[in-house]
């Protein structure tokens, strides 16, 4: 894909929020935030999947990246992204797979800061598009998404195999 991996090691400040790459010392904070995300969507994963997922985010050969958003020096939000090729364009495309902010900080700009950071690192890596989905009942997040992106009009289908 010709991606510049250095683009993914960037930290940036957005107002009062610092967004930075996940590190191996972030495991306890990441677990807490990941649990919150999974609880929000009323789902669980086996412990082995936590271990595998965390390892993937730290593996420089993986096209998966994780970022934490800090408020007052503590991780309070996360995002996970996957960079991939696209059949219609020659540049990389970014799938923003997960986004979570602690409930007491929703509406403070932290979610927007995380998304702005995804835009920044994707562009720095040579990517030209970021896309994501959310559950239709996630009205709070959809208000933000409607302000900073456009609805594609596509409907997602899925089948477990």
Image: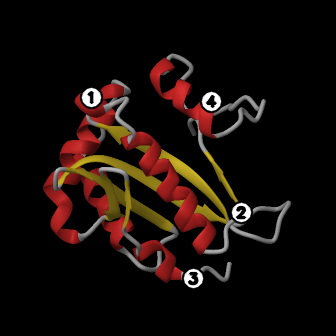
- Residue 70: % across, % down: 25, 53
| Residue carrying label 3 | 4
Of callouts 3 and 1, the N-terminal one: 3
Which quadrant, please, contains the N terminus?
bottom right
Question: Marks 3 and 4: which is nearer the front?
Answer: 4
Q: Do residues under tags 2 and 1 come within 8 Å of each other at their CB atoms?
A: no
Of callouts 1 and 4, the N-terminal one: 1
Of callouts 3 and 4, the N-terminal one: 3
| Residue carrying label 1 | 103
Q: Residue at x 71, y 63 (%)?
A: 128
Left or right of 154, for residue 58: left
Residue closer to the observer: 134 or 111: 111
Q: Residue at x 47, y 82 (%)?
A: 6
Which of the numbered marks, if any, corresponds to residue 146? 4
| Residue carrying label 2 | 128
Q: Is residue 29 visible?
A: yes
């Amino acid at each position: 894909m010709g991606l510049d991996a250095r683009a993914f090691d960037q930290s940036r400040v957005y107002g009062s929020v610092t967004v930075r790459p996940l590190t191996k010392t972030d495991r306890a904070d990441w677990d807490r935030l990941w649990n919150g995300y999974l609880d929000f969507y009323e789902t669980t994963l086996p412990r082995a999947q936590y271990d595998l997922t965390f390892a993937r985010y730290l593996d420089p050969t993986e096209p998966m990246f994780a970022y934490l958003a800090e408020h007052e020096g503590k991780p309070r939000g996360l995002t996970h992204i996957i960079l991939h090729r696209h059949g219609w364009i020659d540049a990389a495309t970014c799938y923003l797979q997960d986004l979570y902010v602690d409930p007491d900080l929703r509406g403070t700009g932290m979610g927007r800061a995380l998304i702005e950071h995804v835009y920044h690192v994707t562009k720095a890596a040579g990517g030209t598009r970021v896309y994501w989905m959310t559950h239709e009942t996630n009205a709070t997040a959809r208000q933000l998404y409607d302000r900073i992106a456009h609805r594609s009009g596509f409907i997602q289908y899925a089948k477990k195999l």
